[in-house]
């Protein structure tokens, strides 16, 4: 069972890193391409998570819905809900310059979190939304697999069934029946988010956004509607953050407002993007995986400190990440994978 | 082409532009000169929709376009450049030009996602146009360089190049020659003349280099302290005593002697290269 635990951990690790990668890609559209400083990532992440949770859970008296809809509809709904919130917020804030947008988004994320906490009819308040189904969880149970094995020729069927019933089969099933499916689902949606964002980046649309980041008046003089372009970037980035929220909710199976504190939902994502290399989608991916690896590794470090230092250890992890961010900004501000490759100096 | 009808603009207590009237004639090259702080660039910003005027109207082809945003004016054929180049530093020179053409299909996300073939095709055409402009401006060798790495003069050329990527009718050039060496200045002059003659662009340019103004512009409009103090052919303007006074710092203006050295009207720029920006030229052939 030892290696089953390890396998589960590996699957878990890549899944969470994948969800963070989706968030980082969303932020890259806003900050990396357009230069928008959104410090309210956790808010859009939360809107996506709650939307998908309410859409996909079975009916409950404790919160709105649930509507028991299939997972893909949950994701689509999450993206639409986050996009709508972004349109409303963007409508108000798109005329603000970057630093003011940053301040506004901090406030908005907190408002969203407090609303989720207090609107019990909608979200069940602090008690959260439980029993969110994992995507496609029924498809890979023992019975389904045994049924599939029945399609195989006789001697093979017997072997497969034997393996499935043995300890190895139990381990495989344990992983398959949930975590592994979640992993595949997350990777599929990560690929979709990647495609959307990368295609946007290399298109003339992305070119205009990068130009806005460089010199807004120059873009206005080139006849582009800067406010509209910025709003589009803000909405696309937020929709992708909403997608990440749906993946998270349906992977973890339970969400409460505590899950959307700025440390995990916003701060880590920023570190990932800056460490990886803002403006570059490969950098965003690399950053998400590398920083999540480091973040997870610090857990082992702090575990070694022992239980009596648990609180301090938690704070120490945050401190380590903060220091790491400073070091990156000083030594390698362009990130691990710079946007312009060798030309990155000027 | 453009009628400026009583435009005024104040910043706090400073009357930057003070009921200015004049006309930029279609097909011509109008020069706009005046000492530093005369309100020329502010006037340009108002004409191009970057600043709202306090009073007055701007007519483009007889239509009131006062207060329209820059992108709307751009689509009506009014394009401006900046005194300090507004290049997109961390993008290549070629990309800087490819931004400009209006109505690119790939500027819409659905097209970028689902009609990639068309977007690609169109972008190749835009790239070809950019290559032509780069060749015209002698910038082909730096086209893949980041624009932030260009010299001051090259950035000025890039500014001019962006106007060539459009179907502009009127181009407002804010000091196209500042910080540009004599050789490069001549090619900018020729470029302006060719664009005027071959493509029918109407120009209005702000410039401190009196040689360039004398060679290109007729009429010349002189501003000082927010007001138009003279206009007409270069010879007439030169002979005007009010103009001489404005430049030499006499009378009510209280301008110090320092203003006269650079702007000594009629003598071009004695110091050779270098203009308002004071940027030493570092043209790399």
Image (cartoon, rainbow, N blue to C red):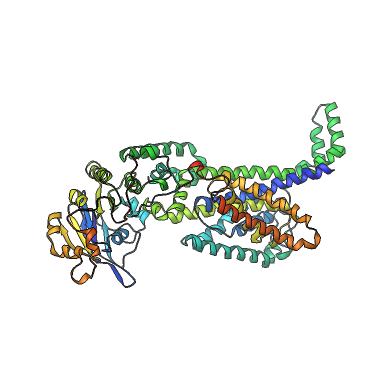
Q: Is residue A70 visible?
A: no
Q: Quadrant of residue A190?
A: top right
The x and y percentages for residue B18 are 25, 67
Q: Which quarter of the rendered picture does the N terminus of chain A lie within?
A: top right
Q: For residue A62, which quarter of the picture?
A: bottom right
Left or right of A57 in this view: A78: left
Total labels: the figure holds: 0
Residue A263 screen position, x and y as percent: 65, 59
Query: Which residue is rendered at x = 54% and y = 64% of the image?
Result: A103
Camera-nearest residue between A140 and B249: B249
Question: Is residue B200 shown left or right of residue A287?
Answer: left
Indicate the quadrant where residue A217 lies.
bottom left
Residue B236, visible in the rendered structure: yes
| Residue B11 higher or lower than A329, as above or below | below
In the displayed structure image, the side of residue A266 where residue A222 appears, left or right: left
Residue A234, position as x, y percentages in the image: 52, 55
Q: Position of residue A254 (x, y in %)?
A: 73, 56
Query: Which residue is more in the foreground, B190 or B196?
Result: B190
User: In the image, A164: left or right of A33?
Assistant: right
């Amino acid at each position: 069972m030892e290696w089953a635990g390890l396998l589960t951990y590996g699957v878990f690790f890549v899944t969470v890193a994948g969800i963070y990668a989706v968030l980082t890609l969303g932020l890259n559209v806003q900050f990396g391409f357009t230069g928008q400083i959104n410090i309210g990532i956790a808010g859009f992440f939360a809107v996506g998570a709650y939307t998908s949770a309410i859409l996909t859970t079975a009916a409950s008296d404790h919160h709105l819905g649930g509507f028991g809809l299939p997972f893909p509809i949950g994701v689509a709904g999450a993206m639409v809900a986050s996009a709508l919130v972004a349109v409303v917020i963007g409508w108000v804030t798109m005329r603000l310059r970057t630093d003011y947008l940053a301040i506004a988004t901090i406030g908005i994320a907190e408002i969203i979190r407090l609303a989720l906490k207090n609107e019990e009819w909608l979200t069940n308040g602090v008690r959260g939304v439980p029993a969110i189904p994992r995507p496609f969880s029924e498809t890979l149970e023992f019975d389904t697999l045994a049924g599939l094995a029945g399609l195989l020729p006789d001697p093979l069927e017997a072997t497969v069934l034997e393996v499935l019933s043995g300890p190895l089969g139990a381990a495989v099933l344990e992983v398959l029946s949930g975590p592994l499916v979640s992993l595949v689902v997350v990777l599929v949606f990560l690929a979709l988010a990647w495609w959307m964002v990368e295609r946007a980046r290399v298109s003339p649309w992305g070119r205009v956004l990068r130009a806005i980041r460089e010199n807004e008046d120059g873009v206005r003089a080139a006849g582009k509607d800067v406010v509209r372009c910025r709003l589009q970037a803000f909405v696309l980035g937020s929709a992708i953050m909403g997608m990440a929220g749906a993946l998270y909710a349906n992977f973890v199976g339970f969400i409460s407002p505590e899950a959307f504190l700025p440390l995990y939902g916003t701060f880590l994502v920023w570190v990932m993007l800056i460490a990886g290399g803002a403006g570059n989608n490969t950098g965003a991916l690399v950053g998400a995986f590398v920083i999540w690896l480091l973040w997870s590794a610090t857990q082992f470090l702090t575990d070694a400190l022992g239980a009596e230092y648990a609180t301090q250890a938690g704070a120490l992890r945050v401190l380590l990440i903060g220091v790491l961010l400073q070091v990156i900004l000083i030594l390698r501000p362009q990130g691990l994978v710079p946007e312009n490759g060798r030309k990155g100096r000027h | 082409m453009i009628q400026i009808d009583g435009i005024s603009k104040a910043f706090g207590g400073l009357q930057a532009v003070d009921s200015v009237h004049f006309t930029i004639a279609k097909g011509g090259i109008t020069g706009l000169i005046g000492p530093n702080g005369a309100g020329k660039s502010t006037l340009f910003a108002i004409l191009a929709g970057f600043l709202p005027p306090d009073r007055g109207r701007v007519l483009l082809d007889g239509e009131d376009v006062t207060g329209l945003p820059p992108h709307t004016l751009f689509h009506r054929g009014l394009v401006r450049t900046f005194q300090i180049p507004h290049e997109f530093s961390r993008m290549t020179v070629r990309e800087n030009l490819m931004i400009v053409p209006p109505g690119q299909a790939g500027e819409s996300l659905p097209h970028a996602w689902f009609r990639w073939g068309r977007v690609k095709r169109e972008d190749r055409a835009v790239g070809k146009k950019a290559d032509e402009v780069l060749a015209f401006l002698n910038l082909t060798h730096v086209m893949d360089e980041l624009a932030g790495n260009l010299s001051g003069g090259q950035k000025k050329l890039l500014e001019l190049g962006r106007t060539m990527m459009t179907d502009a009718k009127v181009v407002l050039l804010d000091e196209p020659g500042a910080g540009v060496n004599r050789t490069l200045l001549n090619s900018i002059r020729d470029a302006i003349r060719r664009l005027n003659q071959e493509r029918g662009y109407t120009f209005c340019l702000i410039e401190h280099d009196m040689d360039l103004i004398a060679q290109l512009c007729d009429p010349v409009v002189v501003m000082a302290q927010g007001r138009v103090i003279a206009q007409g052919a270069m010879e007439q303007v030169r002979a005007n005593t009010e103009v001489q006074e404005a430049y030499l710092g006499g009378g009510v203006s209280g301008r110090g002697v320092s203003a006269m050295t650079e702007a000594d009207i009629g003598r071009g720029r004695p110091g050779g290269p270098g203009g308002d920006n004071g940027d030493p030229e570092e043209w790399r052939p």
